[in-house]
Amino acid sequence: MRLQEKVIVITGSATGIGKAIARRCVAEGARVVIHGLEADWAAEVVAELGAEVAVALVEDLTAEGCPERLVALAVAQFGRLDAVVNNAAWVAQGNIENTDAAFFRRMLEVNTLVPFLLIKAALPQLRAHRGNVLNIGSVNAWSGEPELLPYSVSKGALMTLTRNLGDTLMRQDGVRVNQINPGWVLTENEARRKHAQGLAEDWYAELPKVYAPAGRLLRPEEIAAAAVYWLSDECGPVSGQVVDLEQHPFLGRNPPKDRSTMAAPDAPHQIVL
């Protein structure tokens, strides 16, 4: 039990990677606060995990006071708060031509400002219990694609927030802040998103090697397994670190251009991470 008796808030945990992290945390002995926008999905996760170890808050994270309410719920239900997982994110396409100021501001608010505000709200509890923060970013933080401009910038800003607070809060408060940047993960939302974009229902069954050298995408459970290390005491004093979780060397990658690795005409061209 690597997370025995720890209490963890996990945003965006009614589905996808967040739900997988919540499941794994409970399996490792933790109690969790589930968060999402869909009341029925959140209720299903709580029912699956058990009301004795899970409670849910269904609310838009950008609503005034929502971060404080998440922290208050953890303390009221379980008596303390040991860790925060900033997993919730808004994924939407946009480029320099079709992105206006309001869209860009909303992206930064959801993906960068809200994690900051939740860390700030949780800090008294994290300080008291020498807790930690795990931010879930994206490999798109390193530059992203033309159609993911605002999203990529928001994840790049989150990465800087992690490195800055990872140093500052460890020095001042003994609180670790780290980040994992998942690559392409087969979540429920991603499967639906690509199908809605016109791909076959089982589009992920056969992927070009240029996108997935292993022949498949990462699974939410694999991201959750990595998250446990950063949330547990096994991490020791490591802080301010960003780790890419992808099946190929993302930075500086120059995939071979032979026919076996070129994307087929109907292959997924837009990778949202």
Image (cartoon, grey):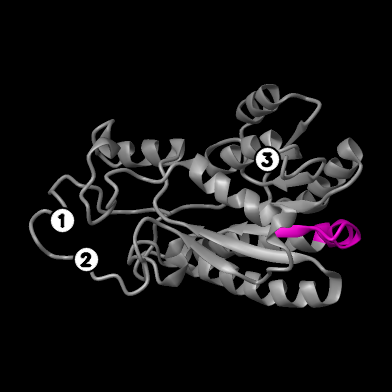
User: Where does residue 217 sit, x and y in percent of width and height?
Assistant: 35, 45
Q: Which residue is mark 1?
A: 261
What number is the disc on residue 25?
Answer: 3
> Which residue is rendered at x = 13% and y = 49% of the image?
264
The amino acid type found where label 1 is placed reads Thr
Disc 1 and disc 2 in contact, CB within 8 angstroms: yes
Lower sequence index among marks 1 and 2? 2
Q: Is residue 32 above or below residue 47?
A: below
Q: Residues within 10 Å of mark 1 (few under 14, many from 20)?
A: some
Label 3 sits on what residue type? Cys
SS for callout 1: loop
Residue at 29% of width from left, 48% of height from top? 214
Residue at 78% x, 72% y is 170
Q: Is residue 192 above or below residue 180?
A: above
Range drawn in magenta: 121-133
Is residue 149 left or right of 256 when viewed as pictured?
A: right
Picture disc at residue 255: 2
Q: Is residue 62 visible?
A: no
Is label 3 in a helix, a strand or a loop? helix
| Along the viewing direction, whichever of 149 and 169 lies nearer the viewer | 169
Q: Quick one: label 2 or label 3, which is nearer the N terminus?
A: 3
Q: Is residue 129 magenta?
A: yes
Is 149 one of the magenta-colored residues? Answer: no
Please give left or right for residue 241 compared with residue 209 in the image. right
In the picture, the disc for residue 181 is none
Q: Position of residue 18 (x, y in %)?
A: 59, 43
Instruction: Report how far apart the C-alphas of labels 1 and 2 lie in the structure.
Output: 8 Å
Q: Residue at x 52, y 70 (%)?
A: 156
